Image (cartoon, helix red, strand yellow):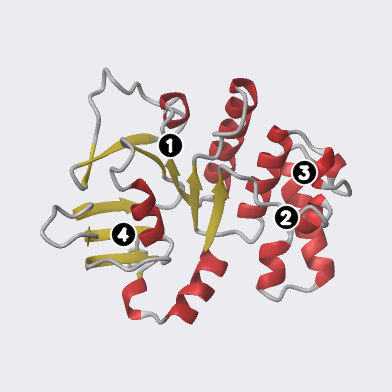
Amino acid sequence: MSIPPAVLALQDLTKGYRSGSAPVLNRLRLELQPGEYVAIMGESGAGKSTLLNLIAGLDRPDAGRVQVEGIDLGALDDDAITRLRRARMGFVFQAFHVLPYLRVWQNVALPLDLLGTARRERHARALRALESLGLASLAERYPRELSGGELQRTAIARALVHEPRLVLADEPTGNLDARSAAQVLALLRSQLHESGAAGVLITHSVAAARTADRILLLQAGQLHAPDAAAAPAAPA
């Protein structure tokens, strides 16, 4: 029986922006299996946003490969990458990026709309996603009627509603208070594990990073495991 490919494989990923200077990413490697959730930390300018853009196929590396479930993004044109991103990736950002004129369930259903899913099925799947995050009672409300924590949980539901294989979260709790942030991160972790999707969390917050299965530091263009004393294991 053949072994399925990793959800995400970064092979010798290299990216630079200025001639003659050290690359922002230098032969970086990473592999994520289904259900694996990793937090990536690093100082400002270390290359976290560059790395996220390369994984998402929004930018292309100078060298190396980005593979999603064995598909090499470098072998795809822009339209094919867009289709892969819509079908296999989910995104959670610091800004909630909800559309104010759509109801909550309609915001959650947007990825399904882009994939051409029938309206009745979009509605049913959006409601299931909202229910799993404790938001079923808010499905018919508009974003202006939700708290920040509720909006971010809505964003998580939207990121997961189309059952992506890879979820990318960029500072998802940066606009939340500590209590709401803890709730959102716990829900994100549990949803990833239940769905079997792999997840990448980009964050400056040690508390946020500790909710992931493991923590990696982006330094000098590569990913390193931090000292155990500096980054205690995530809770079980």
**Crowding near the residue tagged with mark 4, few <14, some 14–19, many ≥20 C-alpha atoms within 10 Å:** many
Please tell me which of labels 3 and 4 falls first in the chain.
4
Q: CA distance from mark 4 to mark 1?
A: 20 Å
Task: Please state which of residues 13 and 167 is positioned toward the viewer in this rendering.
Answer: 13
Q: Upstream in the sequence, badge 4 or badge 2?
A: 4
Residue kind at label 2, given as amino acid type? Val
**Residue at (79% x, 52% y) in the render:** 100
Which of marks 3 and 2 precedes in the sequence? 2
Specify few, some or many for label 2: CA neighbours under 10 Å numbering under 14, 14-19, or 20 or more.
many
Query: What residue lies at 47% left-to-right and 29% top-to-bottom?
Result: 208
Tell me: 102 left or right of 178. Answer: right
Quadrant of the rendered image containing residue 184: top right
Query: Residue tagged by mark 3?
Result: 131
Q: Nearer the viewer, residue 143 or 208?
A: 143
Disc 4 target residue: 9
Q: Secondary structure at mark 2?
A: helix
Q: Position of 19 compared to 148: left or right?
A: left
Q: Earlier in the sequence, mark 1 or mark 3?
A: 3
As measured in the structure, the alpha-carbon distance from the residue carrying label 2 to the one carrying label 3 is: 12 Å
Query: In the image, residue 160 lies at what x, y percent?
Result: 62, 53
Q: Which residue is mark 1?
A: 203
Query: For numbered disc 4, what is the local secondary structure?
Result: strand
Image quadrant containing the N terminus:
bottom left
Residue 104: x and y, percent? 80, 50
Residue at the top extreme of this rendering = 229
Mark 2 or 3: the one toward you: 2
Which residue is disc 2 drawn over? 108
CA gap between label 1 and label 3 equals 27 Å
Q: Position of residue 86 (x, y in %)?
A: 56, 68
